[in-house]
Image: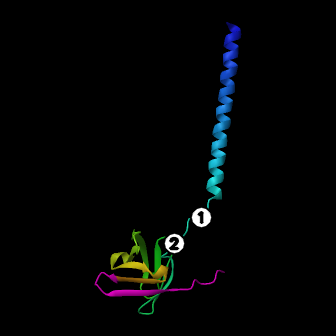
Amino acid sequence: MTHLLHTLDHRLCSLRTAGFLVLALLIAVGTASAADSPAKKADPIAGRWRWVNNDIVTILPDGTASCPSVGTATWKCTSTAKPPTYVLTWKDGVFIDTIHLLKGGKEIKGTNAQGQEIIATRLPDLPKK
């Protein structure tokens, strides 16, 4: 009986060791795939835009935007249908623009909260420092 208990204990210990090895392997594979996966692409709205009034608006991938004459804004994608729709909220809601990304990401058209038309064209990115 003692021999049987000793054998069972030895097998349970082996199973636990194998279980830990499998778990460690799964964690290692998961970590490697996450590290090897490509970085998330920036939203296609991100970039520099020349508004119809000649303002330069910079829309950043982090959900913010800026314009020297207006200040800062936040933006969010409200629809990924074609064409994608975005809402820019300037000065804590004082100005709200609803825009659509058109022509393969090279043009923006939409309206502001007062119903005025917004048109913008994409500018080249600034050179990286």
> Was residue 19 drawn as part of the magenta stretch in this picture?
no
Residue beneath disc 2? 61
Q: What element does badge 1 sit on?
A: loop
User: How dense is the environment of label 1, judged by Cα within 10 Å: few (below 14), some, or many (20 and up)?
Assistant: few
Task: Verify whether residue 114 appears in magenta.
Answer: yes
What amino acid type should be assigned to the residue bearing mark 1?
Ala
The residue positioned 71% from the left and 10% from the top of the image is 3
Three-letter residue code for mark 2: Pro
Q: Which residue is mark 1?
A: 39
Image: magenta residue range:
111-129
Q: Residue 61 appears at what percent x and percent y?
A: 51, 72
- Above or below, 101 against 7 in this view is below
Q: Residue at x 62, y 49 (%)?
A: 30
Q: Residue at x 70, y 20 (%)?
A: 10
Left/right placement of residue 48 relative to residue 32 reads: left
Q: Name the residue at 41% across, 93% down.
A: 53
Looking at the image, the residue that sits furthest to the bottom is 54
Disc 2 vs disc 1: Cβ atoms closer than 8 Å? no
Q: Position of residue 1 (x, y in %)?
A: 67, 6
Question: For the C terminus, which image quadrant?
Answer: bottom right
> Label 2 neighbourhood size at 10 Å, few (<14), some (14-19), many (20+)?
some
Residue furthest left in the image: 114
Indicate left or right for 112 with 2 as reference: left
Q: Secondary structure at mark 2?
A: loop
